[in-house]
Amino acid sequence: MIQRKVWIIALFCALVLPIVLPYLTPYESNPSLLEPARAQAAWGCLWVVTIAWLFFQAARFGDDTARSGLGAYFLSSGVSGLSQMMQIWLACLSFLLPLVLVALAVCFIGAMPSDSAQAQMWVATNLQYAALFLLVVTPLMMVAVSVGSRFGSTVGYLIPLCMSVYGMYGVGYLAMMTDVQSNLLLDWLYIVSPHYHLADLTPRLVFKHGSMLSSEFLQLVIYFAGIKIVLAMLSTLTFQPKAVA
Amino acid sequence: MNSYPAKLTMCCALVTGAALWGGMAVKFASEDKLSYEPNVACLKGSPYGKIFALAMQGPIGFYWHEGKTHEHASTLADDHEHHAGCADGCHGHQAEAAATGAELRDGNVPLRVRTQEKIKQMEATVHRKTNGEPLSAAHKQYIQGEVEDKLRLAYELDPTNYTNYGNYHLFLSINNLGRAEADDYAALGIASQTLETCKQDELDPASWVTAANAAYNIIDHIGRHHKDYSVAQAKASLAEFDSCIGRYEELLAQALRDGRAIPAPRLTEMEGRVAYLKRLRKAQGVYMQRIMSNDMAAHSPHHAN
């Protein structure tokens, strides 16, 4: 009954790990570690599940549509390529959104501060985080679908995977390089790289920094919306509903 | 999709997106908002960092001993023969210890114990060094770099862990494994930074052991470089240490009152460290008193005894 149901693993990671993992910390001597550890595990698991599993699913759906002839069939029945891509992408979102809700639920139920002002800030931070997270991963999911349909699921998976890891951590190492030796090309490469680490608000939750100032949050939304538009357009150009022999 | 308006729309959207992306990126770069140090999964300084900080101690020992651990060394050294080093406890014989004396005398060691021993031995043989040549200077320097990186990482994962802080501080303040020279000022920087971080902790007495350790390192630094410091600074450093010990004792009593479980070995370790630090402080206090009244008084405007 549970064979071939990968969502069970994903749900396990997103729901059970944030409950279990905090008990590995030395919480006996310092009980205040539990709440931040839950929030950290919830968001950490969400990132891992999205990058490791959902991008792969998206790429495979794109690949399957083109390879199986389903895309060609829909095309002949009047469903345009753009519409097909959007529908596959929305299908992927139907996995992603419940997982985001699970992460929020873990933070709201398992780690809510008791003080009302703090609680309000905690909710705001989590909602800001959810918004930025979705702005980062949903365009990458579209890239996975479209590249998967044209170049196959492996390439379709690797490209968003590399982009997200590069944007989260790679650019930080690039910054270290540019700090050591100033190079015009590297400096510009650094600036125009997708700075996905800006959307990672985990430290704000772990170290209780409070919510972001709304003006600064808005700037980030505009920045990621820009990346989203570019990636969406490139995905539309790349998507190929029927495989070329 | 191929119609002219569709293409135009896409082009406009691409340009708009790129303009928003690039414009904001340039704005962020000018405000220095893009610079950051990668902290994978926010582990450094987090509750999980505390676990990984403990786990780092194994790999550090592995590099420090040039590719083997204490356990490998003792397993290879004895190959079931007791040696001089076994007097103060030999890791290699832990499995044997699990069997009773009577079983060992009869040669009737349980299969479980023998198998454990065999696996340990095999693991040790994988790390047996057969090359008699000593390491080159460059190679030693490389290992020293690796040890330093690992010590720093362990420290950054949990700056309040006294073992990792102590190891990293010691590494910075000695010259070993081909280090050109000890870096007293880097060590002082780490001590001050650790003291500040640990003082934020209002719950865990262990953080205050680390704070006291860092405070002692600062006293020691002032003692060795007393010409650069005033008497007031020296006195403040001693008072800082005493207040850390006081806070440790308060928090420990509080934790025990609250019924928070502190594992017995950890408690013994903390108590041992604190007792050791107090002894060091006592001896250092006498030395500091002497230099404060002899050497420092001459150049200090704040001397008030």
Image (cartoon, rainbow, N blue to C red):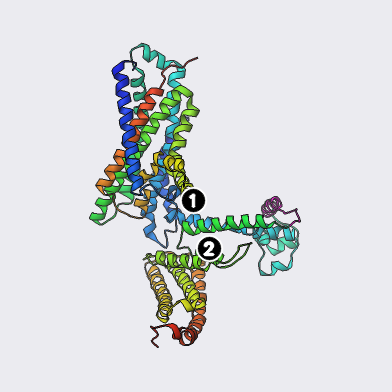
Residue in the foreground of this view, choosing between A236 and B180: B180
Decide if residue B153 is on the left or right side of residue A16.
Answer: right
Residue A65 against residue A40 in the figure, above or below? above
Which residue lies at the image location 38% right of the left edge and 29% below the top edge? A142
Which residue lies at the image location 35% right of the left edge and 29% below the top edge? A232
**Amino acid of disc 2:** Tyr
Q: Residue furthest left?
A: A116
Counting from the top left corner in percent of width and height, residue A20 is at 43, 49
Residue A55 against residue B56 in the figure, above or below? above
Counting from the top left corner in percent of width and height, residue B47 is at 42, 55
Could you say whether the residue bearing mark 1 is in a helix, strand or loop? Answer: helix
Q: Disc 1 or disc 2, which is closer to the eye?
A: 1
Which residue is disc 2 drawn over?
A: B168
Q: CA distance from mark 1 to mark 2?
A: 24 Å
B130 drawn magenta: yes
Kindly report the secondary structure that dominates the magenta region of the rendered protein. helix
Q: Which quadrant does the N terminus of chain A fall into?
A: top left
Q: Residues within 10 Å of mark 1 (few under 14, many from 20)?
A: few
Give the extent of the magenta segment: B111-133
Counting from the top left corner in percent of width and height, residue A179 is at 46, 50
Q: Chain of mark 1?
A: A
The part of the image, by quadrant, that contains residue A190 is: top left
Residue in the foreground of this view, choosing between B117 and B239: B239
> What number is the disc on residue A180?
1
> Is residue B67 shown to the viewer in this render?
no
**Amino acid of disc 1:** Val
Counting from the top left corner in percent of width and height, residue A60 is at 45, 26
Could you say whether the residue bearing mark 2 is in a helix, strand or loop? Answer: helix
A164 drawn magenta: no
Q: Chain of mark 2?
A: B
> What number is the disc on residue A139?
none
Q: Please determine if labels 1 and 2 lie on a single subunit.
A: no
